[in-house]
Image (cartoon, rainbow, N blue to C red):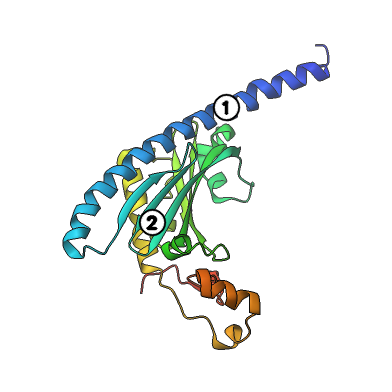
Amino acid sequence: MPKPTGKDLILKVLKEKSSLKQDVFHKNIKVFEEMKSVIKEVVADLKKEAENIDKRIIVDFSDKGPHEIELKVAGDVLFFHMHTNVFEFDKSHPIWKTSYVRDHPSRSFCGMIYIYNFLADSFKYNRASDVGYMIARIFTNNELHYFVEGKRQLGFLYNDFPNKTIDRQAMKNIIESAILYALDFDLFTPPFDEMQEVSVSQILEASENMRIKTGKRLGFRFQADSDQID
């Protein structure tokens, strides 16, 4: 049997890997589009009830384009962002311990959707130096099997990659878990010693746009936030 040429090897990779990545990417686009629809439903359902609790509570949704969704709930903003690349997992990752992936390694290629949490006031007052936090990321493969890496319930409720496929109910559950986490993830007062010094430019900017840097765990290690609900 003749030894494969460089061209043969390139075509083999294009067939086995590049084509697969295209499939995963387009599946992830469809997942993200459906997630937009689910978020819209969740917002419509929550908005009416929230107004009955307190008319000052804002629940809203904004489509920011093909790869980004903004969900505002009270003092929090959640950004759902679809990455445009396809990823494979390091061999040390737990998914490789499952026969589902070991038997068919191509199943390890996934699209990824991030969920970030910011303070609503950071955008309201144009505080560009404020920080947000990634609270979860959703992985979906070519067969629409999915799992979630994240904080608290986001990290352990949605991790049955071999058996679970993503659908509207799964999306709704993830979205509601993300909202619950954001609402429970409170703004802590930064350590006093870390806030003593402030530059003239910072205080001048603060007087105009309140731009002194703010984040829910500013001055604390985010990893110190417990994954367990108190």
Q: Which mark is residue 114?
A: none
Upstream in the sequence, badge 2 or badge 1?
1
The structure residue drawn at horizontal position 32% and vertical position 41%, both measured from the top left corner, is: 38
Q: Residue 42 versus residue 208: which sits nearer the camera?
A: 208
- Mark 2 Cα shell of 10 Å, populated few (<14), some (14-19), many (≥20): many
- Mark 1 Cα shell of 10 Å, populated few (<14), some (14-19), many (≥20): some
Q: Which mark is residue 178?
A: 2
**In the image: residue 115, left or right of residue 36:** right
Quadrant showing the C terminus: bottom left
Residue 212 appearing in the image: no
> Mark 2 belongs to which amino acid?
Ala
Give the mark count: 2
Residue 154 appearing in the image: yes
The structure residue drawn at horizontal position 35% and vertical position 65%, both measured from the top left corner, is: 183
**In the image: residue 8, left or right of residue 133:** right
* Residue 192 quadrant: bottom right
> Mark 1 belongs to which amino acid?
Gln
**In the image: residue 111, left or right of residue 35:** right
Residue 155 % position (x, y): 44, 57
Look at mark 1 in the image and give the residue it sits on: 22
Q: Where is 64 relative to 50, above or below?
A: above
Quadrant showing the N terminus: top right
* Residue 188 quadrant: bottom left
Marks 2 and 1 sit apart, C-alpha to C-alpha, by: 28 Å
Q: Are marks 2 and 1 in contact (CB under 8 Å)?
A: no
Q: Residue 122 versus residue 78: which sits nearer the camera?
A: 122
Q: Secondary structure at mark 1?
A: helix
